[in-house]
């Protein structure tokens, strides 16, 4: 019985769907104005930007450009929580980042990469008061097991336990 459970656990780990980091880099998109913008399983929604678009020939491939400040929100298309690792920003604005968990970053944007490592967030809000370019947003969607898969695994283990018990009696 212990050997069977160990084998099942091994295959569950091997064949599980590990999450991996994605980088939203706006590459290959030219002057995209739609709302929301979608890339690699994530939405970027604008709330108050008077003008935004994607420059496809900026920063080796593309960047989101905003004029005169505003707000945007990043969420996962699936609705699962995600980790927010880092982003590149440059421009002339003062930025404020917040998450649904109360994480906050306040700073003046300059050319640079900000590393945050915020975990298990449902959304990230960017607020700026001037022009900024945003690029290379690194996110990692947190895997959430499906209830049906867990139920099937549990039933399978229970069935193995009962069949094993019948054989020994």
Image: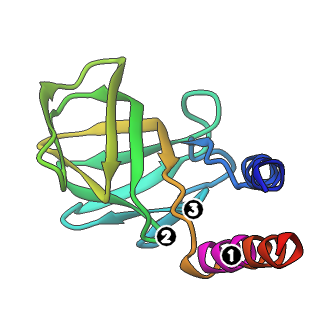
Q: Tell me where the magenta segment starts and ends, as one range.
A: 149-158
Q: Nearer the viewer, residue 32 or 127?
A: 127
Neighbours of disc 2 within 10 Å: few (<14), some (14-19), many (20+): few
| Residue 134 coordinates in the image, percent (x, y) | 39, 38
Which quadrant of the structure image shows residue 76? bottom left
What is the quadrant of the N terminus in the image?
Answer: bottom right
- Asked if the residue at tag 2 contacts the one at tag 1, i.e. Cβ–Cβ closer than 8 Å, the answer is no
Separation of residues labelled 1 and 2 (CA atoms): 35 Å
Q: Secondary structure at mark 3?
A: loop
Q: Earlier in the sequence, mark 2 or mark 3?
A: 3
**Label 3 sits on residue:** 41
- The reply, left or right, for residue 139 in relation to residue 28 is left
Is 82 covered by the magenta stretch? no
Q: Nearer the viewer, residue 91 or 164?
A: 164
**Label 2 sits on residue:** 77
Q: Secondary structure at mark 2?
A: loop
Which quadrant of the structure image shows residue 41? bottom right
Q: How is the image coloured?
A: rainbow
Disc 1 vs disc 2: which is toward the camera?
1
**Label 1 sits on residue:** 158
Q: Secondary structure at mark 1?
A: helix
Q: Is residue 138 above or below residue 41?
A: above
| Residue 111 coordinates in the image, percent (x, y) | 34, 18
Q: Earlier in the sequence, mark 1 or mark 3?
A: 3
- The reply, left or right, for residue 122 in relation to residue 9 is left
Separation of residues labelled 2 and 3 (CA atoms): 5 Å
| Residue 34 coordinates in the image, percent (x, y) | 46, 72
């Amino acid at each position: 019985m212990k050997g069977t459970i160990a084998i099942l656990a091994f295959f569950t780990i091997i064949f599980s769907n590990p999450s991996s980091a994605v980088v939203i880099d706006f590459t290959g998109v030219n002057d995209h104005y739609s709302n929301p913008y979608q890339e690699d399983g994530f939405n970027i929604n604008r709330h108050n930007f008077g003008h935004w678009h994607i420059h496809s020939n900026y920063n080796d491939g593309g960047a989101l450009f905003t004029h005169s400040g505003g707000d945007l929100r990043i969420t996962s298309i699936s609705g699962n929580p995600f980790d927010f690792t880092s982003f590149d920003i440059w421009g002339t604005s003062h930025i404020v980042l917040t998450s649904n968990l109360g994480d906050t970053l306040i700073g003046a944007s300059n050319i640079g990469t900000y590393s945050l490592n915020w975990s298990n967030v449902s959304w990230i809000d960017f607020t700026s008061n001037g022009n900024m370019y945003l690029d290379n947003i690194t996110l990692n969607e947190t895997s959430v097991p499906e209830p049906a898969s867990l139920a099937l695994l549990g039933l399978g283990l229970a069935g193995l336990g009962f069949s094993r018990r019948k054989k020994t009696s």
